[in-house]
Image (spheres, grey):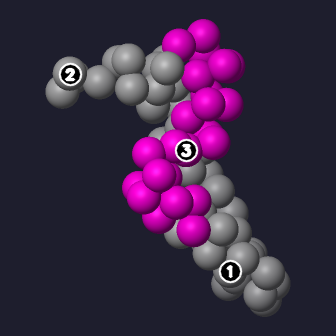
Amino acid sequence: MTPMRAQRIFMGILLTIALVLMHSGFSWGEYIIWFMIFMLIFSGITGFCPSDAVFGKLFGKKVNEDSCCQ
């Protein structure tokens, strides 16, 4: 599995957990979504995403190395 695919699966799981928490009456699930929004905007502006670094270390390569667009 590539780091990019693992990152996307992880983001999907986090969003699912946040939505389940929100619909179960736990309002703090919304903070998970706001955190993800902030980090996506931050990485878009700065070009640095902390999860890229983490998944790169876990899988031993950069997240963007496996891109088909390079």
Question: In percent of the image, x 61 and y 52: which residue is there?
Answer: 13
**Which residue type carries mark 3?**
Cys
**Which residue type carries mark 2?**
Gln
Magenta stretch, residue numbers = 38-61
**Which residue type carries mark 1?**
Glu
Magenta span contains residue 48: yes
Task: For marks 1 and 2, give the CA distance.
Answer: 36 Å
Tag 3: Cα neighbours inside 10 Å, few (<14), some, or many (≥20)?
some
Q: Which residue is mark 1?
A: 30
Q: Earlier in the sequence, mark 1 or mark 2?
A: 1
The circle drawn on residue 56 is none
Q: Which residue is mark 2?
A: 70
Question: In percent of the image, x 55 and y 44: which residue is there?
Answer: 49
Question: In percent of the image, x 20 and y 21: which residue is there?
Answer: 70
**Residue 5 vertical position relative to residue 39 in the rendered view, above or below:** above
For this view, does 67 lie left or right of residue 8? Answer: left
**Residue 55 vertical position relative to residue 29 in the rendered view, above or below:** above
Residue 40 drawn at (x, y percent) = 49, 59
Question: In percent of the image, x 60 and y 10: which residue is there?
Answer: 60
**Residue 18 vertical position relative to residue 14 in the rendered view, above or below:** below
Which dot, 3 or 1, sits closer to the camera?
A: 3
Q: Earlier in the sequence, mark 2 or mark 3?
A: 3
Q: Which residue is mark 3?
A: 49
Decide whether the magenta segment is chiefly helix, strand or loop. Answer: helix
